[in-house]
Image: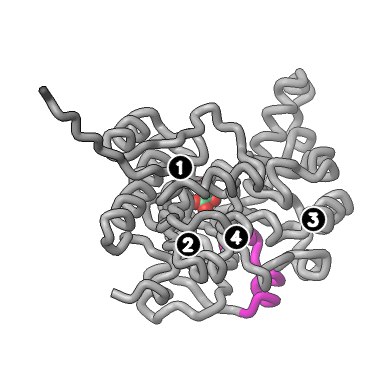
Amino acid sequence: MTTQIKTSKPKILVARAIFPEALAKLEESFEVRSNQEDQIFTPAELKKELSSVVGALVTGSERIDAEALSEAPNLKIVANIAVGYNNFDIPSISAAGVMATNTPDVLTDTTADFGFALLMATARRITESEHWLRAGKWDKWSIVSNPLGMDVHHTTIGIIGMGRIGQGIAKRALGFEMKVIYHNRSRLSEADEKACKATYVSKEDLLRNADHVVLVLPYTAENHHTIGAKEIDLMKPTATLINIARGGIVDDLALAEALKAGKIFAAGLDVFEGEPKVNPELLKLSNIVLAPHIASSTEKTRRAMGDLAIQNLRAALDNKRPPSLINAEVFKE
Ligand code: DGY
């Protein structure tokens, strides 16, 4: 007679679709509740899903707060597949004794590339020009009538939020011989400032002097509407505003009104208040480039983000320290 040994694998949640190879690998070690159909859970569904698992891979669409965790006594880790973690209520996650992790570094260059691409597209009116061409207007070409943009080279870039991605954008700007000014919660070290040839200025001075303002700061309650009507009023009428940070950092309605009134030249947005909804006033405008939150979206980087999130999850479930633990002060080594 043979005895069957029943092994039970720890149960985890993968809250959004991930690359199939990564899922297959997870299934070797875990009982996985996956969501490859990619239907976003309602808060009530998410709470129920979390109640029976020891770990969860989530994204910005899953809000993890006290309510979501209220019936999840066995949960050890929530691993975000994103560097930004404004979907996490960190005090509540820590109070529940759960580790929170994110995916820094692996997306820095890809996101900085995109920030620069959006700046270029916005200043040079690339999408607007494509629409113009598609609308059959090319035969109306003249030196003065086709879309005229703003220069990028030899202008001043103002970066608000000078973390890894902000510094990556600054280094790209140097190749365009731009002057780099920045504003950040805390000033960079002398060595980092030197590497980016960046000058620290107040937010107001940055807004007054930059030809291109790029937002790369994390979303927090105090950063809500960092850019609103008052701030836009300080900007040059020829300036562009680029937001690759988070929706809510810019007052989208105030921006739409300013663009309509020609208070600034153009804007490029990858993130929106209340996304995936986009303020209809923004959709009516032509002096804006809109992207659906794709700054980190290359296959290589999205795979790397997933891999790092999985590495974090496995570490926590093996009673090891996850490489990118956010609430590190709660889980002392
Ligand atoms: C991040 O990682 O925070 C990005 O915004 C998600 O693509």
Q: Which residue is mark 4?
A: 65
Q: Which residues are magenta?
A: 202-217
Residue 13: mark: 1
Q: Residue at x 41, y 74 (%)?
A: 330
CB under 8 Å between discs 2 and 3: no
The amino acid marked with disc number 4 is: Asp
Residue identified by numbered label 2? 170
- How many marks do you count on the picture? 4
User: Is the CB of the residue bearing disc 2 within 8 angstroms of ligand 1?
Assistant: no
Q: Check disc 2: other Cα within 10 Å, few if <14, some if 14-19, many if 20+.
A: many
The x, y position of residue 283, in whole percent, is: 80, 39
Q: Could you give the CA–CA distance between mark 3 and mark 4, rounded to whole angstroms?
A: 30 Å
Of helix, strand and loop, which one carries label 3? Answer: helix
Q: CA distance from mark 2 to mark 1?
A: 38 Å
- Proximity of marks 4 and 1: CB atoms separated by less than 8 Å: no
Marks 4/1: CA distance? 16 Å
